[in-house]
């Protein structure tokens, strides 16, 4: 006998309203967990970038240290991705860019995924432009692909022109 067919006469609309509230809480919690994990990862990457820059300044170590660091970290943490030579170098570059103005990871920057952060630091010229694209990425929930298009089309210099382009791109990406 099904739960809904018992003699208690369950009110289906009441049940569906109730279960949908629980589902919404689960979705909300999952989102907060993902955002928290992303923020913690970015804090770690900030610290790694800072440590590299400080060690290079104090000890005169060159870029070879990044290669050795990658080898050592991958050996110690084989199940964790993100310790490639390129990624560690990106951590350093990311720290160098934002540490010009901030002592800790800027809040808006910590709210977008690392992939978008890497794209921003590789494609922008200065901290103000990087912060602009971080803000727009967060505000508009841009994917990496959409962010790249916006940077290449120089959204920062023509924001109104790209309002309709963004809508078309989002529609096209949703159709895929």
Image: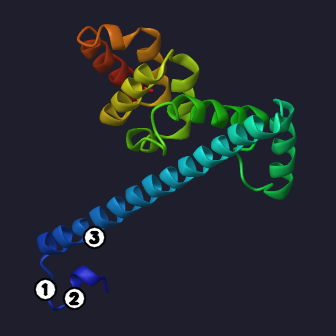
Task: Give left or right: position of 85 versus 97.
Answer: right
Q: Distance between the residues labelled 3 and 1?
A: 21 Å
Determine the residue positioned at 32% across, 60% down. Answer: 28
Which image quarter is the N terminus in?
A: bottom left
SS at mark 2? loop
User: Front-most of 43 and 112?
Assistant: 43
Could you say which quadrant of the image residue 139 lies in?
A: top left
SS at mark 1? loop
SS at mark 3? helix
Report which residue position mark 1 lands on.
Answer: 9
Residue 118 % position (x, y)? 57, 30
Q: How far apart are marks 1 and 2 (CA)?
A: 6 Å
Could you say which quadrant of the image residue 159 lies in?
A: top left
Report which residue position mark 3 lands on.
Answer: 22
Q: Distance between the residues labelled 3 and 2?
A: 22 Å
User: Front-most of 143 and 95?
Assistant: 95
Image: 117 above or below 50 = above
Q: Is residue 116 visible?
A: no
Image: 66 above or below 165 = below
Determine contact: label 1, label 2, CB under 8 Å: yes
Task: Give left or right: position of 95 versus 88.
Answer: left
Task: Give left or right: position of 102 versus 10.
Answer: right
Residue 37 % position (x, y)? 51, 56
For mark 3, does the 10 Å Cα neighbourhood hold few (<14), some (14 to 19), or many (20 or more) residues? few
User: Front-most of 121 and 54?
Assistant: 54
Residue 42 % position (x, y)? 54, 47
- Numbered label attached to residue 6: 2
Image: 173 above or below 68 = above
Sequence order check: which comes first, mark 3 or mark 2? 2
């Amino acid at each position: 006998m099904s739960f809904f067919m018992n003699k208690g006469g369950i009110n289906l609309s009441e049940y569906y309203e109730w279960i949908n509230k629980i589902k919404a809480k689960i979705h909300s919690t999952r989102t907060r967990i993902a955002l928290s994990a992303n923020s913690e990862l970015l804090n770690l990457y900030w610290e790694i970038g800072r440590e590299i820059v400080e060690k290079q300044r104090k000890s005169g170590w060159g870029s070879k240290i990044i290669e050795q660091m990658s080898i050592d970290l991958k050996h110690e943490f084989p199940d964790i991705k993100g310790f490639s030579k390129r990624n560690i170098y990106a951590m350093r570059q990311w720290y160098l860019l934002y540490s010009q103005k901030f002592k800790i990871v800027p809040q808006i920057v910590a709210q977008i995924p690392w992939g978008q952060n890497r794209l921003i630091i590789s494609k922008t010229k200065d901290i103000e432009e990087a912060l602009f694209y971080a803000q727009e990425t967060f505000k508009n929930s841009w994917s990496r692909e959409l962010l790249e298009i916006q940077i290449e089309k120089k959204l920062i210099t023509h924001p109104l022109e790209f309002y309709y382009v963004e809508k078309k791109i989002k529609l096209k990406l949703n159709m895929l």
